[in-house]
Amino acid sequence: MLDALKQNRTPGRHFGCVVVDNGSTDNTAEVARRLGAMVIQESRRGYGSACLAGLEHLRAAPPDAVVFLDADFSDHPEEISSLLDPITEDRADLVIGDRTRLAQPGALLPQQRFGNALATRLIALRTGHRYRDMGPFRAIRWSALESLQMSDPTWGWNVEMQMRAVQNRLRVLEVPVQYRPRIGQSKISGTLRGSIRAGGKILWAVWQYG
């Protein structure tokens, strides 16, 4: 990921990489530090908790925009420019990577596709805006992100962001991105129990933030 960021540099655009270690059991943090990333430790488990910890670190010197990217190899960091360009060109405030069209076979599991379709349909019913995907690979203008006052500590993070973006009248754009099978097994989509818990949380988040 860090190598792709270095190769993806654009004149006048400066990248920084913050890796939030949310209880990993391998040498992720060590490797990230060795490659030049700022590593933040977050003991509170949950995807949203990790995102909130990273954002809190950035508040000391806020960037113009933030890109959220999973570190499980499924996303393609070399596509960051396709998410950032609409923001730097002032065509969008939030850009979401749409995995549904370019995902490799087997990259999106059946339970992921079902949950994605259900969540986007429910959000459309509550807000009137129909998203194609709930993908984690996304970019957002810092000022727009701060206006959303994000708070969800778990799997409702993406739902909260996408619903509040509509409610706050942000300019939202979805762009096709590639997606490949992740390395290792997901704690959420990789098990039946995790999928059920995540599904319940998504349903709760659609109701809560709607």
Image: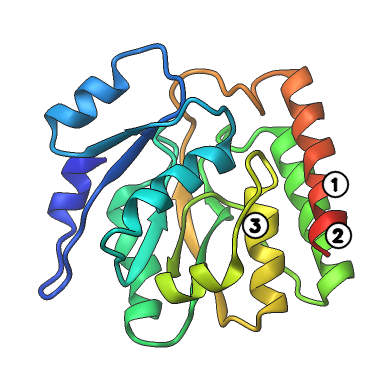
Q: Nearer the viewer, mark 3 or mark 2?
A: 2
Q: Nearer the viewer, residue 45 or 125?
A: 45
- Label for residue 203? 1
Q: Which residue is mark 3?
A: 133
- Circles 1, 2 touching at the beta carbon (< 8 Å): yes
Q: Earlier in the sequence, mark 1 or mark 3?
A: 3
Q: Are marks 1 and 3 in contact (CB under 8 Å)?
A: no
Q: CA distance from mark 1 to mark 2?
A: 8 Å
Q: CA distance from mark 3 to mark 2?
A: 12 Å
Amino acid type for the residue under numbered disc 3: Asp
- Amino acid at dot 2: Leu
Residue denoted by label 2: 122
Q: Give residue 64's position: percent from left, percent from top.
A: 31, 72
Residue with the most extreme bottom position: 90
Residue at horizontal 85 percent and vertical 46 percent from the top:
204
Image position of 177 with respect to 182: above or below: below
Which numbered disc, 3 or 2, marks the residue that appears first in the sequence? 2
